[in-house]
Image (cartoon, rainbow, N blue to C red):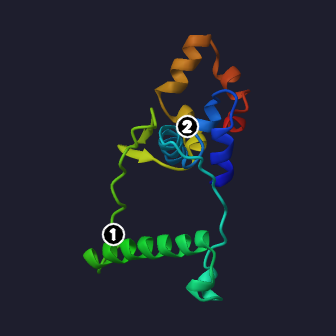
């Protein structure tokens, strides 16, 4: 995610692929926050689970923050499972982030991963295919000659 975030923050122009990448909403929210605070923000990749081999106090500050974040995520997961002990808990509700101007809905659910593949598949299965074919006056042969997979 850090590489995608750096790419997004340093982009020279907007590209549709950036906005359909995974975690784009979180990256946009971070960029929005960072543009409003009077601090220089840097990001750093941290290896996970460093506390398996070393004591917490021996870890760098970023590694300690990672351990604490993991503990919070695990606590939330356990809380979720405690509410639904006999079944798989439902996914947590998706909360749209204001900095992200658009989301993809699929069957009434927010699509939060594999957006490009989902859009390519949807083109083949919905009225969108017919709309595009009518707009460009394409036959089924013309439609089928296009490499739709490369758009994902």
Task: Looking at this view, name the residue that lies furthest to the front.
Answer: 38
Other-residue count near label 2 (Cα within 10 Å), few / some / many at <14 / 14–19 / ≥20? some
- Depth check: 151 or 100 in front? 100
> For the residue labelled by badge 2, is the local secondary structure a helix, a strand or a loop?
helix
* Residue drawn where x is 36% and y is 78% of the image: 78
Q: Which residue is mark 2?
A: 119
Q: Is residue 100 above or below residue 127?
A: below
Picture coordinates of residue 25 (x, y %)?
49, 44
* Residue drawn where x is 64% and y is 54% of the image: 2
Q: Nearer the viewer, mark 1 or mark 2?
A: 1
Q: Left or right: where does residue 34 sit relative to residue 43?
A: left
* Residue drawn where x is 52% and y is 21% of the image: 130
Q: Do the residues under discs 1 and 2 have CB atoms within 8 angstroms?
A: no
Other-residue count near label 1 (Cα within 10 Å), few / some / many at <14 / 14–19 / ≥20? few
Mark 1 and mark 2 lie on one chain; the one further toward the N terminus is: 1
> For the residue labelled by badge 1, is the local secondary structure a helix, a strand or a loop?
loop
- Depth check: 55 or 16 in front? 55
- Depth check: 13 or 42 in front? 42
Picture coordinates of residue 31 (x, y %)?
54, 41
Picture coordinates of residue 27 (x, y %)?
54, 46
State which quarter of the image contains the C terminus: top right
Q: Which residue is mark 1?
A: 89
In three-dimensional space, the C-alpha distance between marks 1 and 2, rounded to whole angstroms, equals: 27 Å
């Amino acid at each position: 995610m850090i590489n995608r975030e750096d790419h997004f923050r340093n982009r020279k122009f907007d590209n549709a692929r950036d906005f359909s990448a995974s975690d784009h909403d979180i990256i946009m929210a971070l960029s929005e926050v960072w543009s409003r605070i009077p601090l220089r923000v840097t990001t750093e990749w941290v290896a996970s689970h460093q506390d398996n081999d070393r004591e917490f106090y021996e870890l760098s500050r970023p590694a300690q923050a990672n351990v604490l974040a993991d503990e919070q995520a695990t606590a939330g997961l356990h809380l979720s499972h405690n509410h639904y002990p006999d079944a798989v808990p439902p996914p947590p509700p998706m909360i749209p982030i204001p900095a992200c101007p658009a989301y993809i809905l699929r069957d009434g659910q927010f699509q939060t991963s594999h957006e490009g593949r989902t859009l390519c598949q949807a083109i083949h299965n919905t009225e969108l295919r017919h709309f595009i074919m009518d707009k460009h006056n394409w036959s089924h042969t013309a439609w089928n000659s296009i490499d739709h997979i490369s758009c994902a």
